[in-house]
Amino acid sequence: MLKRLPGGEVRNLVSTTPDTAVVFKPAVVQTPAILTILVFLGRLVAGLVRTLLVHPVAVAVLAVPGVIWVRYGWPTAVAAVTIPGSLLFGWVLADRASFARWIGWRLLAFWRRFWIYRRHWQPVMIVSGLGRHLQGRDYLPRLLRVECDGWADRVTVRMLSGQAVKDWADRTEHLAHGFGSTSCRVAVAKAGRLVLTFPRRDPLAEPLPAVPVPESSTVGPVEVGQCEDGTPYRLKVHGTHVLIAGATGAGKGSWLWSTIRGLLPAMRVGLVQVWALDPKRMELSFGRALFGARYAADPKECADLLDEAVCVMQERADRFAGLQRSHTPTVDDPFVLVLVDEVAFLTAYQSDKGLRQRITAALATLTTQGRAVGIGVMAALQDPRKEVVNIRNLFPDKIALRLDESEQVDMVLGDGARDRGALADHISPVPALGAGIGYVRLETSPEPVRVRAAYVSDADIRAMVAEYGSRSEAA
Ligand SMILES: Nc1ncnc2c1ncn2[C@@H]1O[C@H](COP(=O)(O)OP(=O)(O)OP(=O)(O)O)[C@@H](O)[C@H]1O
């Protein structure tokens, strides 16, 4: 048995070069067996101590009854298990969330570390090419920590020296399927350490009803839907520009309408104006009364409205010059959000060259100079192959809803987004399962966040128009 210890194989290594009689035999230095055994024992003790430190709850649940059994006999051990067990069961019934936070997820993490990740670590690492098998030894990335919450496992790993984040990002599919998940996302924790996120279920599989209209009038980030961890997602619109790309039926409308809905109280008091460009006449026309005179559908009217926005922008820039460097919305200088549904209709597909150039120039001017003076642009785009290369860099924040091809993901979100887990081409085309789901990439963070926008139904829009239509118009 000792002959099979790692390193022993070197003894049998013989290498020859073709066509010569010269034979090379490496010198073999035998490691004393006692040294190898001591190293193994040391590693075992270190592993036990590490398990105790990382999973104290799970170790206590397993060890304490055993110790009581040995010292005081089985009846005491059964009582020691039954009494706390009943108390814990009562805790589950009384407050499931706090039980999960303090006990449940920790036990699950302990179990999944042992049963899923530790058990499959070596084969998955070797087969995916992230580990190496050299001269009878495995060189594997270190599995440092497993944490669980309601929807995913977060696995912290230490990369092998010399590995790059891209090596892992290129193998997310191997990792996901190797550890029994549908996807895997890679994020950098610190130098040499990564956090891999493996979803266990999809919390966004059910459509979300429209978010209630906020009570206060704010232009701060607008609640438009929900993130995977169940927290509300708030989209920043003031001080940025947002591009939303998605195939037909991907749910771009729910992002536009959820944003308008969150701004309604601020529109009512005059802190926000939404200017709507609706060349398809199918989306924003439904709530036309909310926009008053600032609605355009015909390409010529759209160009005029954009030019008007540029005039407002330039007039403000003249007034603010030397006085203020950022915009605070007031009734006199409200935040102007220019919404464009299907921007390619006005640019790429526009046959009138003069109009196309006017619109493109106005959009470029607004997106490059507008945010400091309180003008924002939110544009929807159906086919990212048209126009996205020209306009993508004008929008600091991008959202990729369902896309037809994997190459389109990086076209919309920027290089490397798909490798980091933005699988927009895998979003279901079934509206109930996938419409409104998208990956958001903000200028402040390279990690794409998966979000589902709430669905604002026709009835919701009618109610919004009835409640806010005329008053917003007046503003
Ligand atoms: N957030 C959502 N949750 C659930 N279902 C949605 C959501 N958004 C849209 N849907 C469903 O998907 C359908 C298509 O949505 P929508 O028209 O907004 O897509 P779109 O991307 O604007 O498409 P197009 O570019 O063709 O106008 C809607 O009729 C609705 O049934």
Image (cartoon, helix red, strand yellow):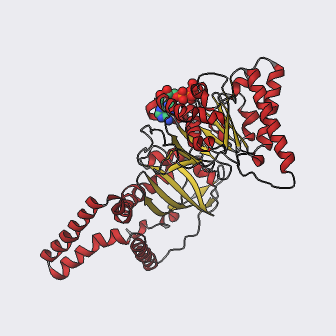
Q: Residue at x 66, y 37 (%)?
A: 475
Q: How many tags in the picture?
A: 0
The answer to whether residue 86 shows anywhere in this view is: yes
Position of residue 77 measured from the top left corner of the image (x, y, whole percent): 17, 74
Q: Residue at x 49, y 35 (%)?
A: 455
**129 up-or-down from 268: above or below:** below
**Looking at the image, which is closer to me, 306 or 442?**
306
Residue 157, horizontal then vertical, whole percent: 52, 61
Residue beneath the point at 74% across and 35% down: 391
Is 155 positioned to the left or the right of 169 in the image? left
Q: Quadrant of the N terminus?
A: bottom left
Is 329 placed above or below 162 here? above
Quadrant assignment, res 33: bottom left
Q: Nearest the camera: 417 or 246?
A: 246
Q: Position of residue 298 (x, y in %)?
A: 71, 20
Residue 409 position (above or below residue 108): above
Q: Residue furthest bottom?
A: 71
Residue sitting farthest toward the top: 351
- In the rendered view, does 402 fall on the left or right side of 21? left
Q: On screen, 192 above or below 201?
A: below
Residue drawn at the location 52% of the way across and 48% of the way down: 215
Judging depth in this view, the residue of 218 and 220 nearest the camera is 218
Residue 346: where, in percent of width, then height?
73, 24
Q: Is residue 347 visible?
A: no
Observer-nearest of 275 and 203: 275
